[in-house]
Amino acid sequence: MQRESYIPLLVGAAVAIVLHVLVVPLSARALLSAPSFGFDLSILGIEAPRQADAGDAIPVTVSVHNRGPRGTGAAASGQVYLSADDRLSADDVLLAALDFDEPLAAGDRRAFDVAAPLPRRAGGAMHLIATVSDTFSSTRAVDESDDDAFAVPIAVQPLMLPDLAATNLIVPRTVRFDEPMSFSYTVDNRGR
């Protein structure tokens, strides 16, 4: 009669438990202390027209510097917004995204050129806000103590919307069924 031994099974389980207790906390500590991506983006400035017409696509150049020790990767992102003030908020309009398809090496600077289409309903004293992010987060929180956002003023001229009115309408006094009729009128544009 052969006896089954549970000793190798118990030894294997004990080794697995010891490894789990020792290795997992060490790797978790290493992850917590390591920098998330190794790059740190900052915006140096924005070049854009100081005034533009609503509905136009304006050229915007955003200068970005990678202050971190490593190049950017897929986690880098940047955007250009139109805002009624100089602070990023939920009601601001996304105009364009910065293309980080080509990595930005550690210490390098790059000028990102984008065409930013202004909304047709925009008008008045506005701001262009450029932001950069080092994370995959879709939330763009602007830390005023950091340089991950930059705003410049822009005066947006509202569209001249048409307001057509027919005036001086002249029609015949009588009209006969199945016969051509002629009339005349003047159209005035009273829009702004």
Image (cartoon, grey):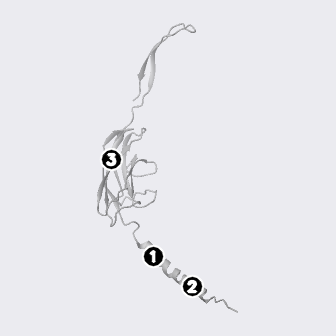
Residue type at tag 2: Gly
> Dot 3: few (<14), some (14–19), or many (≥20) neighbours within 10 Å?
many
Q: Indicate the quadrant containing the C terminus: top left, top right, bottom left or bottom right.
A: top left
- In contact (CB < 8 Å): disc 2 and disc 1: no
Kindly identify which numbered label has been placed on residue 29.
1
- Residues 115 and 89: in front is 115
Q: Which residue is mark 3?
A: 60
In the structure shown, which secondary structural element does the residue marked by tag 2 occupy? helix
- Residues 100 and 145: in front is 100
Image height of 141 relative to 25, above or below: above
Q: Marks 3/2: CA distance?
A: 63 Å
- Picture residue at 37% right of the left edge, 45% below the top: 116
Q: Of tags 2 and 1, which is closer to the observer?
A: 2
Q: Position of residue 76 (x, y in %)?
A: 39, 59
Q: Indicate the quadrant containing the N terminus: top left, top right, bottom left or bottom right.
A: bottom right
Q: Quadrant of residue 176?
A: top right
In the structure shown, which secondary structural element does the residue marked by tag 3 occupy? strand
In the structure shown, which secondary structural element does the residue marked by tag 1 occupy? helix
Q: Which residue is mark 2?
A: 12
Q: Position of residue 19 (x, y in %)?
A: 51, 82
Residue type at tag 3: Val
